[in-house]
Amino acid sequence: MTAFALIPICGTADEQLFGFVRGAETLPKGRNDLYEFITLRTGKAEGSYYGLDFETEVEHGFTEKFQASLSLEQHYFNNQGVDGDRDALDDQSAYRFGGVAASAKYGLLSPFKDWAGLAVRLETGYLWNDEVDGLEQHEVFIAPEIDLQKNFLDDTIIWDLDLGVEFAWGKQPAEQYPREMALQAATGVSWRFAPNWFVGVEANVRAEYPMFDFNNFEHVVIYGGPSLHYSAKRWWATFTWAPQIWGSGVDEPHDGKTYAEETSQKFRLKFGFNF
Amino acid sequence: MSDWIHRIVAPPALVIAVGAVPCYAATYLTAEQAQKICFPEATEFIVADVKLTSTQMKAIEKDSGVRVRLHTQKVWRAKAGDRFLGWIIQDEVLGKHEFINWTLALNADGSVKQIEILDYRETYGYEIRNDKWRAQFCGKQHGARLKLDDDIRNISGATLSCRHITDGVKRLLSFHELMLKH
């Protein structure tokens, strides 16, 4: 405990400029990060819906290019009158333990030395309750991803692009199908407009296919919006507002939105600490 | 407070409580101290600041391949009596979040004599103050390759700072070549 207490917690390393997009940088060897992500999802086709997600993650740099993390996911739901053609959720005000996850990331190219930064990332986890309304499930997922990062103008403008896929098993009874595949991508551009400050725009898309079958489409959704990032000596914070830009879901009206598993708005606040 | 709030707050609070010891940014040297370290035999440092036109900035950028941000470059001529010893150029480069202030000392022939880091406000990368790392630049002249992992060794975990200082040296050697040499 004494040794731990002497480790300085300060500044930033694998800091995240965006709410929903990851860069290609990795933690220096021997360094640790603690993240807290707080996400508010709100807005359904009817009623009032508030889904709060709390993700606590600890990350360690094992080598200069390899880092790994463990995380806890927790939820709080407050929904009233969300019961229509698109969704039928029980009224509730309840805490639910989401699950646990682990990730590993390996940097292949450095955004500071090479033409661009490139990293491969793998995440896996076990989720006891789903994130729509906390229904019980026993989901195991695995999500490989490629992270690309290109820096411009002395690293004051940063563009990130993530491409990935997620395979999940055990989503019943929260969902209709026992397994599901999701294609996901995210991109964002951020500009350092003053020392310590970045402002950017970002977007992410996710398309879900039950039974790992591309002919079995469930829904696709695009969120996008602005991000503001601040880095202090000992911590950093990122705030992102991401309204649903477009969506389409099977068995939902074709009005350019999907609400069965999604919301009209997402807000995410991230904190990071290095130690 | 509701029980669920305790459950949510507890994990991050525990980690922060265990690891939280503050660290501070450091100012290592003033400009005057750096001048005397670089040229201990100097008897005077004569201000010779250079205000750059946009044409001159572009010329330096073209020559060095590095963006020029400062319109005015702070420069001193180091002299020991009537003898010209060399130049001191004060500069700043971008750190990941804030500026890194540093000075470049050039010999009378324009080769690098010494680098001094005045202050460093970043969390990672302070290793650029390492004597051996800075010594790599000694003797470098205009036209040197000055590239990380080539003629300049990188420091893992301090890559951004290493690259920006390396680019800074390249830019100031071009600045000397075009603005001070003649």
Image: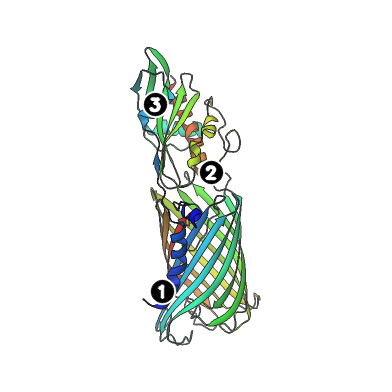
Secondary structure type for disc 1: helix
Q: Is A168 drawn above or below residue B95 in the view shown?
A: below
Residue at the disc numbered 2: B159
Mark number for residue B5? 1
- First of labels 2, 3 by sequence position: 3
Spatial distance from mark 2 to mark 1, Cα to Cα? 40 Å
Name the one closer to the observer, A91 or B18. B18
What colouring style does the render use? Answer: rainbow
**Which subunit holds the residue at mark 1?**
B
**Which subunit holds the residue at mark 3?**
B
User: In this view of the protein, can residue B39 be seen by the observer?
Assistant: yes
Residue A9 in percent (x, y) is at: 45, 53
Residue, far left: B47
Residue drawn 57% across the image and 78% down it: A218
Residue at the disc numbered 3: B35
Q: Is A70 drawn above or below residue B54 in the view shown?
A: below
- First of labels 1, 3 by sequence position: 1
| Amino acid under disc 2 | Thr
Q: Residues within 10 Å of mark 3 (few under 14, many from 20)?
A: many
Q: Is B127 drawn above or below residue B59 in the view shown?
A: below
Mark number for residue B173? none
| Amino acid under disc 3 | Gln
Residue drawn 46% across the image and 59% down it: B18
